Amino acid sequence: MNTLEHYCRVHNFGTTAVARASILYARRFTQRFAEVEHLPAPRREVELLRLQFPTALQPPQSGDLLAGRILYPCVGISPEPCGLGWFFDFQGIHDWMACATCSADEAEEARTLIRFWETRITQVRVRAAYPPELAARLPTDDWFNASDVGFPLYRMAGTVLDYGKLLERGLDGLVPADPEPDSLFSAAREAIGVLQSSIDFYAAQPETPDDLRDVLHSIRHQPPRTFREALQLFWLWAIHSGTWNYGRLDIALGPFLARDLDAGRVTEAAALDLLCSQWRLMHAYTNQYNNRVIIGGQGRPDEAAADRFALLAIEATQRVRLNQPQLSLRFYRGQNPLLWARALDAIGEGCTFPMLYNDEVNIPAVATAFGVDSATAERYTPYGCGEYVLGSSSVGTPSGVVNLLKALEVALHGGRDPRTNRPLVATPPAGTLDTFDKVWRAYTAVIEAYIAALADQEKIEYAVAGREAAFLYLTMLSDDSMARGKGIFDGGIRHLGGTLETYGNNNTADSLHVIDELVFRRQEISLAELVAALDANFEGHDELRRRCLAVAKYGNDEATADAMARRVHEHVCRATRQQAARVGLDSYQVVVINNWANVVLGRCVGASAEGRLAGDTLANGNNPSPGSDRSGPTAFLNSLVRLDPSLHAGAVQNMKFTKEWFRPENRPKFDALLRTYFAQGGAQAMITVVSRDDLESAMREPEKWAHLLVRVGGFSIRFIDLPHDAQMEVLHRTLH
């Protein structure tokens, strides 16, 4: 969400000037919303889009080869960038009211706006639709600060659009020229008109170069003819739609690039400049958790043309050295070997991109997970932090988070949260857990209660969002939606699925393994004694903590530890999948990702049996607990492949390697290590190449290390932009 303070910084205006302009816009938008609130959702939406655009648009900046800078206003509609559906920047308005220059009359007007929108933003209406039992299970949305096992999220993130259709047909070819009045098609046609007005806005700006103005005029009505025109039309649609993930752009854009290069209309250098400009626009627009561009993989109709774009995309990523877009390479045996080689070149330079996805594992895994044929599974598209959707034919919004380690803590305290003493789930008293099977059943009871609640939440969120808006720009480029005449979340999309983010998976597995070993197999300590030590954060229990730490951990190619990790993984994945049919979704699946939620959610969990101290970070994605993998990279990778990828909709594997692996004499060894991992069933890899000295230097002198990128989870970021505890989590990961 862009606050008024952010507006001031971006525009270099005084707080008063920007705030008053924003309030004026908010007043107009609110008045118009009140006038059209009674209209059908598609009609209401298009009426408000006319105000949102071009208000949100910014003129080109010096060096921009494409138009498309955007700064969302304080009120509007989007599927995700500013909050689900209808949004209002409450924080920004409150910031304005606190300013000394805000008059009493202006403050009263701001309060009037707040009162109007506090019951009308879509997020509030989703929560208002919870039945009492669901509201009791999920009492708060504040997962950054509250202590609980599960939390709802509010967003429509899991959408990837069919940009190929847009580029083939052009704006005028997407919707019938004379649709029935007051139909979805009529609203869609008018939404295209809004975008065409935005083109006029950009063309009229004095900052727009003449050659760019010609591009804009060309795409207003006609399908794009050149690579630059295709890039421009794609990007304008993306920012109007509010999507943050762009799918397989090598399929959509590769043919335009190839034709221009072959005809001599553009040089390789000029094409690279265009793509670098596009990368910079993406970086300016989105957040670090999204912004996926996918290249490579099976199922590309014109593979040769797609490869030319893919190679250019890797080169652009190397040149701009930004943490966005998140370039991701799908690969398979028989693919152009240059893609793999250039990818490793970029990774070895410290780009952290591209991320690597193994089609030979992922396609059959996706087919099983989603219950689709191989041809459909070929369309799998990573988005966000590493979740999968089926191209433009599915939605997979992650609308809930669940903390597995917190669930275990609650189970060990008789169903109460020891931090708040609030009862969460009815489980047997801790004193009755006299077998490991009883511990397991108590833990799974807590997890399953929250999984069911979050599945209910997901279905309610879709239902409310579908009633609130048609999300016209999403609907027009989603499979089946226009043919069915329904909005994407209102019965339009072919495959309506959801996902559940899980955290602390392998901390939980390691803790359960320690409990099984020390309490029940070896009988070295009672469960009550162990829980007392955990409640004391191991203070006065140093020897017990040493024994907990000494028990084998996941990530070391150790059979019993890895078996427990598989057990935890399979349980949460299967329990989640079972919810789909109950709530009426085509799929509901776990995603084992990370967006530094492992750091945030770790803060509300006390000490845990694997030896972790209270408040310490949780494991990153599918990775071992920080520092617990001590047996080298081969053992680490052997453990990773034991977690079945066909049970979920995406998982991230973060790997940290020293720069020495990429020296000429060592590069073949690294290549062989990585290829062996993938041949044995590795699905994915996200690689950071860095030294511990670099990280420590960046913490001491951040001003000298603005270039240092690291993988946090499902995203990359400048290391110096991380909060301290997140920096420490990255620092303490095992460096191979």
Image (cartoon, rainbow, N blue to C red):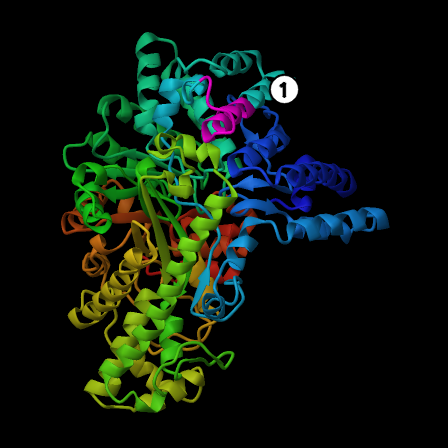
Is 580 situated left or right of 696 in this image?
left
Task: Name the magenta segment's main secondary structure.
Answer: helix
User: Which residue is rendered at x = 40% and y = 72% of the image?
Assistant: 406
Above or below, 247 against 399 in this view is above
At label 1, the amino acid type is: Glu
574 within the magenta span: no
Q: Is residue 340 visible?
A: yes
| 10 Å crowding of disc 1: few (<14), some (14-19), many (20+) | few
Residue 134: x %, y % from top left: 45, 66
Residue 658: x %, y % from top left: 32, 51
Above or below, 702 against 318 in this view is below
Residue 352: which quarter of the image? top left
193 within the magenta span: yes
Outermost residue to the right:
104
Is 669 situated left or right of 429 in this image?
left
Quickly name the residue at label 1: 207
Foreground residue, 466 or 4? 466
Residue 315: x %, y % from top left: 36, 29
Above or below, 201 against 87 in this view is above
Is 154 situated left or right of 352 in this image?
right
User: Which residue is rendered at x = 41% and y = 49% of the image?
Assistant: 710
Is 545 situated left or right of 299 in this image?
right
Q: Is residue 709 visible?
A: no
Residue 453: which quarter of the image? bottom left
Q: Tell me which segment is drawn in magenta.
A: 177-195
Query: Could you say whether the residue bearing mark 1 is in a helix, strand or loop?
Result: loop
Residue 644: which quarter of the image? bottom left
Q: How many tags in the picture?
A: 1
Foreground residue, 117 or 734? 117
Residue 125: x %, y % from top left: 55, 53
User: Which residue is rendered at x = 38% and y = 42% of the image?
Assistant: 491
